[in-house]
Amino acid sequence: MTHQAKAVYDHMMETDYCSQWMGITPIHIEEGHCKIQMTVKKEMLNGFGILHGGMAYAFADSAFAFASNSYGRVSVSIQGSMNFSKSAKEGDILIAEAKSLNITHKTADFDVLVSHKETGEQYYFFRGTVYRSSKEVLNIK
């Protein structure tokens, strides 16, 4: 884990109550790359007993946020889409891995693959774009 990327992750997690509630833990954090994990809770399920689509999106979005802000500049989502390949169930441990595709001065594109930790099967695929501001993450209170 690079020092700045880890410091940004820690700073963001201090007040990222959604990611805290989801039980997200870091596996690998570096500039432009983030790998996190969570276990699917009963409270995350929809009426069919599978992970609610909004929760799957939120998990991928957290990896996206940590990876895009890892360069130290405040970066906020301006576009995101997700494909749902397979449904996660209660107790499944998921990994979300975000990787940068293209970084410019004002925007950046990322892919996030959400897979089952034990089987490696792909469950969800997210692609998003952020706007990169000139503000520094570590100077935001």
Image: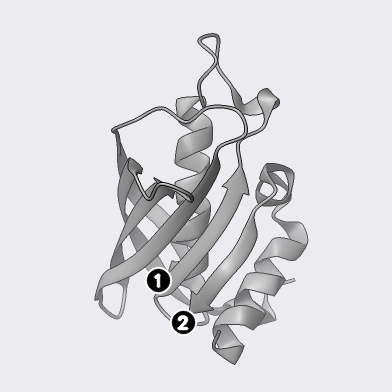
Residue 30 in the figure: left or right of residue 40: left
Mark 2, Cα crowd under 10 Å, few <14 / some 14-19 / many 20+, is some
Q: Position of residue 8 (x, y in %)?
A: 61, 77
* Residue under the image location 48 percent in, 65 percent down: 35
Cα separation, mark 1 vs mark 2, equals 10 Å
Q: Position of residue 107 (x, y in %)?
A: 30, 69
Number of residue marks: 2
Q: Which residue is mark 2?
A: 71
Work out whether mark 1 precedes mark 2 in sequence or the reverse, and give the earlier one.
2
Between 73 and 44, the one lying in front of the other is 44
Q: Position of residue 113 (x, y in %)?
A: 35, 52
Query: Would you say residue 74 is visible in this rendering?
Result: no
The quadrant in which the N terminus is found is bottom right
Q: Position of residue 141 (x, y in %)?
A: 75, 71
Amino acid found under the numbered disc labelled 1:
Arg
* Residue under the image location 62 percent in, 27 percent down: 44
Mark 1, Cα crowd under 10 Å, few <14 / some 14-19 / many 20+, is many
Query: Would you say residue 14 is visible in this rendering?
Result: yes
Q: Is residue 44 above or below residue 97?
A: above
Furthest-left residue in this view? 102
Q: In which image quadrant can residue 42 be found? A: top right
Q: Which mark is residue 132?
A: 1
* Residue under the image location 31 percent in, 39 percent down: 82
* Residue under the image location 49 percent in, 58 percent down: 63
Label 1, secondary structure: give it: strand
Q: Is residue 21 above or below residue 136?
A: above
Label 2, secondary structure: give it: loop
Between 121 and 41, the one lying in front of the other is 121
Furthest-bottom residue in this view? 3
